[in-house]
């Protein structure tokens, strides 16, 4: 007999009656995921037959989509979730059952559906906050899993294996890779594969924050911290990520002062809001990302060495698209379906020549550039099959042009310079527009122009 069964059998029947009366259905499982108790209301709600005994059966055999085993495995509660049961929206709460030493011996789920209107103020408040943060490009919604990294190339499979292992460790991760390789997607995938998956994922583009706002946005503000500040104070993004994951994109762009404060967050797990003299404990897992060489910045004195080593505990290097050419057909198919779904445009396919060109192009902007070119093609194509012309191949280099190179780097630099020059010409030398055409950041564009002596 399991510990939970013993507890139920020795408990006052009034306890189970009370639990049943508080909701429209309840079910409990033991540490082996076997059902040890379910209320009559739960049977009726799930339309389970009265003449069948479910006690002792594996809960997944009866309810294949149940989330209780996940609660049992992680030991983390799910205080509020919405699910549809027999065409009726229900609010669901799932809780782990723990011993005094913290070990989990079971899980219990409660279903509510009579009073969802009482939750409307909470939904409205969350929607307003989410809309505000998303509009400011500060909060990024965690919607991707590791399976959303499309492809089966050795380079991709390796990074997915590394990411899955890293997700189970509650330590700092540093994502490295060129612009457009999918660092944010990987960060969300790691979060959703980790024990913190039910807590918030808060993403911040550090390069998009004005220097004067970085400290307030990260660490929050105390009441009356400065003229015009919220009189009640304001939570920072680190507090919003409590219990979950904080994703710091473009980490190389933060100032020395913020580097020092961030170091304390990682070392001491505490923050001090702007205008406050009180330290506050925080529980966040930090994933940082950069397309720049942090070690070189450390050597030049532009980035703190101690922060670099704190961030570099688990470095993951994302492969460039040119290093995973076999994945291009699958990625292209996935992206074109996504573009068609989101834009309402008809679903198109790639011609043989277009697919060959995609696999031969050097992709300075990686997957982001691929997405941009496919989106352009879906708009410009006049046939069912996308041509190389629709992809903009003719703008970059003539297919009839043959150039002999004795040095591979020379060939690569020549092709990259032509891509940059064409984008600059099309944008009338507006570098922001040129960077967007290439699917890279403005800073990356400047760096490449400088490197190629253009």
Image (cartoon, rainbow, N blue to C red):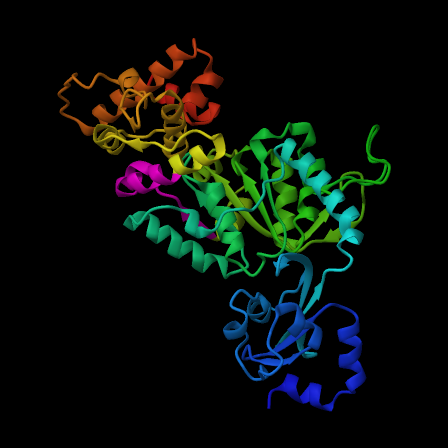
1 to 424, vertically: above or below = below
What residue appears at the point 26 percent right and 42 percent down from the top-left corner? 326
147 to 427, vertically: above or below = below
User: Which segment did they paint magenta?
Assistant: 314-334
Which of the 4 image quarters holds residue 235?
Answer: top right
What residue appears at the point 79 percent right and 70 percent down from the top-left corner? 22
Total labels drawn: 0
Who is closer to the viewer here, 421 or 263? Answer: 421
Q: Residue furthest top?
A: 428
Q: Magenta stretch containing residue 331, yes or no? A: yes
What residue appears at the point 31 percent right and 33 percent down from the top-left corner? 349
Q: Is residue 195 left or right of residue 82?
A: left
Who is closer to the viewer here, 75 or 420? Answer: 75
Who is closer to the viewer here, 313 or 236? Answer: 236
Q: Is residue 317 left or right of residue 15?
A: left
What residue appears at the point 29 percent right and 48 percent down from the top-left corner? 153
User: Can you say which quadrant of the picture contains the C terminus?
Assistant: top left
User: Can you say which quadrant of the picture contains the N terminus?
Assistant: bottom right
Q: List x then y, in percent, for residue 329.
A: 29, 39
Q: Magenta stretch containing residue 20, yes or no? A: no
Which of the 4 image quarters holds residue 40?
Answer: bottom right
Q: List x then y, in percent, for residue 219.
A: 70, 42
Q: List x then y, in percent, for residue 251.
A: 54, 38
Q: List x then y, in percent, for residue 420.
A: 35, 18
Q: Main secondary structure of the magenta part?
A: helix
């Amino acid at each position: 007999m399991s510990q939970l069964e013993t507890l139920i059998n020795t408990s006052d029947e009034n306890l189970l009656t009370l639990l049943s009366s508080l909701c429209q259905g309840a079910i409990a499982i033991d540490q082996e995921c076997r059902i040890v108790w379910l209320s009559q209301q739960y049977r009726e709600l799930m339309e389970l037959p009265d003449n069948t005994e479910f006690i002792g059966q594996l809960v997944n055999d009866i309810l294949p989509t149940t989330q209780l085993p996940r609660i049992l495995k992680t030991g983390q509660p799910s205080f509020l979730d919405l699910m549809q049961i027999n065409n009726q929206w229900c609010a669901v709460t799932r809780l782990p059952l723990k011993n005094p030493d913290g070990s989990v011996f079971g899980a219990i789920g409660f279903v509510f559906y009579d009073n969802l209107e009482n939750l409307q103020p909470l939904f409205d408040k969350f929607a307003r906050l989410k809309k505000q943060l998303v509009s400011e490009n500060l909060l990024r919604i965690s919607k991707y899993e590791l399976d959303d990294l499309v492809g089966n190339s050795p380079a991709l499979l390796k990074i997915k294996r590394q990411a899955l292992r890293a997700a189970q460790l509650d330590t700092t991760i540093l994502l490295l890779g060129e612009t457009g390789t999918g660092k944010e997607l990987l960060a969300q995938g790691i979060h959703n594969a980790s024990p913190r998956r039910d807590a918030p994922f808060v993403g911040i583009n550090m390069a998009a924050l004005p220097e004067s706002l970085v400290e307030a946005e990260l660490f929050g503000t105390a009441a009356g911290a400065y003229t015009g500040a919220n009189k009640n104070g304001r939570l920072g993004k680190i507090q919003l990520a409590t219990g979950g994951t904080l994703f710091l994109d473009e980490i190389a762009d933060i100032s020395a002062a913020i580097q020092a404060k961030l170091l304390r967050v990682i070392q001491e797990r505490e923050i001090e809001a702007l205008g406050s003299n009180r330290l506050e404990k925080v529980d966040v897992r930090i994933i940082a990302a950069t397309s720049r060489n942090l070690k070189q910045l450390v050597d030049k004195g532009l980035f703190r060495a101690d922060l670099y080593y704190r961030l570099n505990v688990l470095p993951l290097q994302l492969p460039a698209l040119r290093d995973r050419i076999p994945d291009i057909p699958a990625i292209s198919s996935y992206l074109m379906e996504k573009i068609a779904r989101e834009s309402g445009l008809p679903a198109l396919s790639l011609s043989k020549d277009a697919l060959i060109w995609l696999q031969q192009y050097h992709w300075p902007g990686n997957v982001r550039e691929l997405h941009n070119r496919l989106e352009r093609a879906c708009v410009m194509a006049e046939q069912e099959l996308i041509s190389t012309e629709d992809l903009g191949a003719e703008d970059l280099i003539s297919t009839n042009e043959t150039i002999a190179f004795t040095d591979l780097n020379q060939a690569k630099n020549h092709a990259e310079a032509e891509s940059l020059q064409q984008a600059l010409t099309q944008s009338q030398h507006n570098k922001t527009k040129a960077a967007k055409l290439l699917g890279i950041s403005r800073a990356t564009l400047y760096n490449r122009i400088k490197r190629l002596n253009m």
